[in-house]
Image: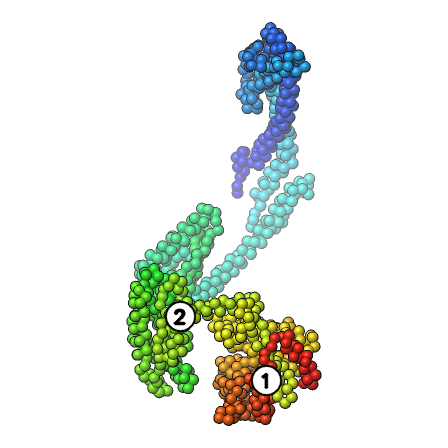
Amino acid sequence: MTTSGPARQRLAWKLTKTILVLSVALGMLLSVVQIALDYRQHSEALDQLFARIANTAVPPARRALQTLDPQLAEEVVEGLVLHDAVTAAYVTDEFGETLAAIEKPTKSSATSLLTGLLNEPQRQISAPLSAANLDDASVTGELRLEFDMNQAFLPFFARAGRMLGLGLIKGLVLGLILVYALRRLLTSPLHKMTRTIRTVDPDNISRAPVTVDPRHANDELGELADTFNAFAIRTRELLESHAIAERNVKESSSQLKLIMDTVPHMIFARAADDTILQCNRAFTEFYGNNMEALIGKRHSELQAPISETEAEQLKARYDHYRQKLKDARSENKRLPRQYEKMLLSNAIGDRRWIESMQLPMESLGRDCTLVIAHDVTDRIEAQDKIDQLAFEDLLTGMPNRRLTLDRLGFDITRSRNNAAYGAFMILDLDSFKTINDSFGHSAGDELLVQVSRHLRQILHEEVTIGRIGGDEFGILAPDLGKQPSDAATGAEFIAQTILRELKRAFSLQAGEFHINSSIGIALYPDADSTAESVLRSADTALFQAKQQGGSVYRMFTESMKLAVRQQLDLELDLRRALKDSEFCLHFQPLVRVTDNVIIGAECLLRWNHPNKGMVYPDVFITALEQSGFMLEAGDAVIDLAFGQLQQWQREGVWPQTARLSVNISPSQFFDASFVEKIIQRLRVYDVQPTSIELEITESTVMQDIRGTMQKIEALRSMGVRFALDDFGTGYSSLSYLKLLPVDVLKIDRSFVKDAIDATSNDAAILQTIIRLARHLKLEVVAEGVETQPHLDLLRDNGCDNYQGYLYSRPVGAQAFRELLLSRRDALTSV
């Protein structure tokens, strides 16, 4: 049992000391406030006094100066220094000459230092001695007085001393009174309560052990006694529950250990000196040892027998993290976590990628670090495989288009820095499409693999060969010479070698094949070469080679560059045209064969060029496709068509059963949001779906039969019609035609044009297509009807509708509106 400490440590003594100090301090503070107020009043009084002294002396001093009377001036200054505070007086004329002056020594006192702290030791006052109101206005001078501020403040210092003494006495008296009251009301009852508490037995608490005087039953002392009694009883309850909690903690610890051992991640705690404090089963399995053998050892020591290098790396990483923690603590920053990845070998020597997180924690009162690590080798290998797939052609194992262009861009920069020239070639297999279409994709794939292997065999290792798309290979030949002519010679030699070697027979499972190939060559670098520009130049040269029949190579020339420049200019113009909405629609009537009644129209795209006027699609459609603008242009066509149809329907010139036909490009049709776009525009423009007919080509359909059917069905279910455009020029697969959910079959103009020629087979083809459409219950539209014999032939063979110059050329929206109004009677009968 403890006893009370020394007297100076007891609460009564501390309170007594504190109260006395505070009381005296309060008394002194009040005295200081009074002194400060008195100081202010005394300073103001001195200012007024000094001013009165000076003003009183000015008239006689002015008179002495005007009369040049030194004796009068001496009397003035002598009278001034009679004042205790005045130490010097001077009367000077307008030239600064002293007419009279007197000085007296400054009296020293104990308050001089204090005066210097509160104020300046000496103060000087000047008063002008002007001759205003006198006859001689030219006479002027100055009266200058010096005051001893210590003498001036002596009364103030006397009062201040008395105030401080009284404040000290008041504080002491107040303090003693408070100490006496506090002892009776607080410290004595507390002392009595303390003696009672010492007698309490914590093992035998059955009732309230502490009582207080009834006078204190309802104040803080009574509350303290009640609180202690409740605490004593609660302590007994807590001791009992602590034993239960201790048993639960042991059970929870066992369960946590089981969970940690079940987790596949390695979890361990290491001390500040890197020794292992705790670890789970995954950690022991990594090092092939039991937990007892690992705990207490440094992690780097466990790794050293497997790999000294890895052990040193571990130690360096841990040292680095320890320094980061030390810096954070010294700067009072949040303790950082550390994430890292490194290669570690396990007990059997397998090198594994380990990703770990280190975070600071406290265990058993000491700082340590919790490390959670897991094996990410499989994930990294999978990511490496994905990266490989991103840059490698899956079929041939060659670099793909992306990697080939990356290497081309790198070599362009390198060649420019080294003043060297290289060449990029595009190799195209002229016969590939025939083999692929005739013998299937497996034969085509087999051919591409054999060609890629053969190219590797015949070309040097420094030459990069990549598959850049379909049956096209990109060939990057660096460092062919210091002059363009030398590089051209080297590139031509490589091209000749490739063409010669690829003329050999290739043995495929489908048979033995001979192929032809064409090559386009572009040299680099020039002033503004980029990978894309060199690729475009090589592609232009390849196009020239194929235009000449194939099996040749062509070098990109300046004349070809003009064509490329024109192509680029066209693409720029198209970009501006899309931005500035320069595209518009013309409409060609769709006419019923039997009675020449307009039953709809086909939208045809036109470009209203600001300088060239109206430009037709054959000029820009291919450029739209190659530049990637076709999707944007197609969306613009839909907006224009639906908007125009909305206007005609509101004006009442468009009959309910008529339809507006819109051509859909492959890129537009296969856009993932195509169906949603059509539905959204039907709602925006508030047009009837039955008034819309979308035209797609056979080649579009054949790219993805299943996807095509799903999109067509989705829109047909709303009432939108579909037409198969240019039938007969593409695949013309009857097996797919009978499955396609289309409404209209449009016969290509090439069959209609020569159908009336007796020597042509087109008439028989035309008849067959019409009969086939009728058998499949499809509406037939013939395109390109230009003469009456054409129309008569179509009518005789049962064709439903036609388009062509015989009835009308494509016209603008206003002209077509007038055409509709002129045929209103016929339209209303549709």
- Badges 2 and 1: C-beta atoms under 8 Å apart? no
Mark 1: which amino acid?
Leu
Instruction: Residue type at mark 2: give it.
Output: Ser
Residue 264 quadrant: bottom left
Q: Nearer the viewer, residue 133 or 87?
A: 133
Please tell me which of labels 2 and 1 falls first in the chain: 2
How is this picture coloured?
A: rainbow
Q: Position of residue 638 (x, y in %)?
A: 59, 74
Say which residue appears at 63% left-offset and 34% top-offset: 182
Per the model, the C-alpha gap separating discs 2 and 1 is 42 Å
Q: Residue furthest top?
A: 71
The residue indicated by pointer 2 is 559
**Residue at (61% x, 11% y) in the render:** 65
Position of residue 746 measured from the top left corner of the image (x, y, whole percent): 56, 85
Q: Is residue 700 above or below residue 9?
A: below
- 809 vs 240: above or below: below
Question: Is disc 1 surrounded by few (<14), some (14 to 19) or many (20+) residues within 10 Å?
Answer: some
- Quarter of the figure with residue 601: bottom right
User: Residue 67: image x %, image y %?
Assistant: 62, 8
Q: Which mark is residue 806?
A: 1
Report whether 190 appears left or right of 330: right
Secondary element at tag 2? helix
**Mark 2 residue crowding within 10 angstroms, few (<14) / some (14–19) / many (20+):** few
Instruction: Decide which of 700, 133 is in the foreground and name it.
Output: 133
Q: Residue at x 57, y 90 (%)?
A: 789
